[in-house]
Image (tube, rainbow, N blue to C red):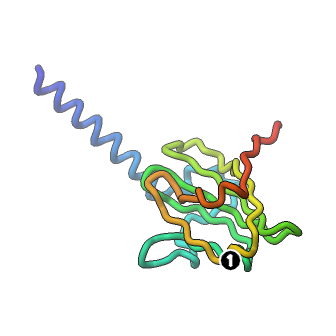
Amino acid sequence: MKTIIILLFILTVLFYTNSCRKDKDDISSNLKSNSNISVVASPFQSPETNDVIIDFDLCMPERKGVAVDFGTTVYEVVGKTEKGCLMKYGGEIENPNWDGFLDKTCIIPVSLGKQKFSRTSVGLNFSSLMPYCQTVSRPKK
């Protein structure tokens, strides 16, 4: 009886692990179909380290999703404003129902130029941008 329970437990773990991996293979299916996010390697991705490089001086508009071990980080460079480069970002950790809402809005000084952001298991490390960012609430419907 113990053997059967152990085997069932192992099969359950294997099934769960496999189903999670399938979600990561097509991570864009986790987002609503109306979201405009491409989850491909960014042309600003450093090939040797898998880091993401954003040039705030250029401030080229783009919206990218970056898959990581346990979720996705999405960033959107909106463009230049009078005060700097407007960027939004957000993400999810193991949440297949995430709707793509970006809960951080940042005005980054263009003087920072190119910045490199490392991937962690739970997202891109944007901690160096925190002085320029604020958390925004989801708009009411």
Q: Residue 96, percent across and down? A: 53, 44
- What residue is shown at x 50% (from left), y 59% (from top)? 67
* Closest to the observer, 103 or 11: 103
- Residue 12: percent from the left, percent from the top? 29, 35
Q: Is residue 37 above or below residue 6?
A: below
Query: In the rendered image, which quarter is residue 64 located in?
Result: bottom right
Residue behind mark 1: 113
Q: Amino acid at mark 1?
A: Gly
Estimate the x, y position of residue 39 in percent, counting from the top left: 56, 64
Tell me which residue sits at (54%, 54%) in the image.
72
The foreground one among 102 and 109 is 109
Q: Secondary structure at mark 1?
A: loop
Task: Check the picture and name the quadrant holding the C terminus.
Answer: top right
Residue drawn 22% across the image and 36% down it: 10
Note whether 46 is above or below 34 in the view shown.
below
Give the residue displayed 66% in from the left and 55% down from the top: 130
Q: What percent of the width, then of the height, locates residue 74?
A: 62, 58
**Residue 66 appears left or right of 136:** left
